Amino acid sequence: MFMYHFTQQDFAVFQIEGLDNRMTALKKTTRPKLEHLGEYFSDFLTAHTDDTYYAHVAKHLRRTTNPPHDTWVAFSTNKRGYKMLPHFQIGLFGSHVFVLYGVIYESPEKARVADTLSKKKETILAFDDFIMKRDHMKEASETIESDRLEENIQRLKNIKKGELLFGKIYFPEHPALKSDESFIKEVEDTFMKLIELQ
């Protein structure tokens, strides 16, 4: 029984047609792993920061027609939710797993976060194999380059729908997805770097 890492069975969930069928498979196959990751990494983040973190596993309750094309567990310092705050995420699309930190468009803290990120640009540029995302709902990401980093930080600050997340992505064949132990270690290492952006 795999408790923490995602397998081909998890990626295959997103090929299942229909909302009910996909949600049934998601609840059986993938959600237990998200719940285990939530328990483990809420404790991990609490231990390695000055805050208490709470896990929020995606339930997809608002969907009535279209099946979800991704799922996740998010970590924030608010017990009730995460969208209004900078937060960490572990999740997957049908194509890859993601481990991220950032802020999305619902947050009133975007300007403050953008100012913090501006001060941390050298740290961000030194990250190896990291990506940045301008839209958490899309699979697309981009490599971190100085000009684009500055552009994305300014977009986060000045555009109402702007958002920005940093982290790593893992395609199905990645060594980190071969065992629970390897995935836990990889996420720990990635989160320790992302904590530096707070």
Image (tube, rainbow, N blue to C red):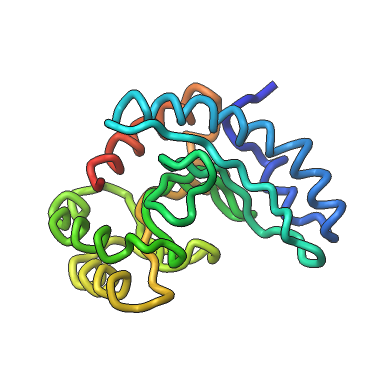
Q: Nearer the viewer, residue 16 or 79?
A: 79
Q: Residue furthest bottom?
A: 159
Image position, residue 90 (x, y; %): 50, 43
Q: Which quadrant would residue 137 be assigned to in this image?
A: bottom right
Horizontal relation, residue 155 to residue 103: left or right: left
Horizontal relation, residue 150 to residue 98: left or right: left
Label count reads 0
Check the image and report above or below for 63 versus 1: below
Q: Residue at x 52, y 36 (%)?
A: 55
Horizontal relation, residue 121 to residue 179: left or right: left
Image position, residue 170 (x, y; %): 48, 46
Image position, residue 8 (x, y; %): 67, 41
Check the image and report above or below for 89 versus 83: above
Q: Which residue is drawn at 59% across and 27% down?
A: 36
Image position, residue 160 (x, y; %): 39, 77
Horizontal relation, residue 158 to residue 15: left or right: left
Q: Residue at x 76, y 40 (%)?
A: 27
Q: Which of 42 and 150 is in front in this view?
A: 42
Q: Residue at x 27, y 66 (%)?
A: 111
Check the image and report above or below for 140 versus 85: below
The quadrant of the rendering that contains the N terminus is top right
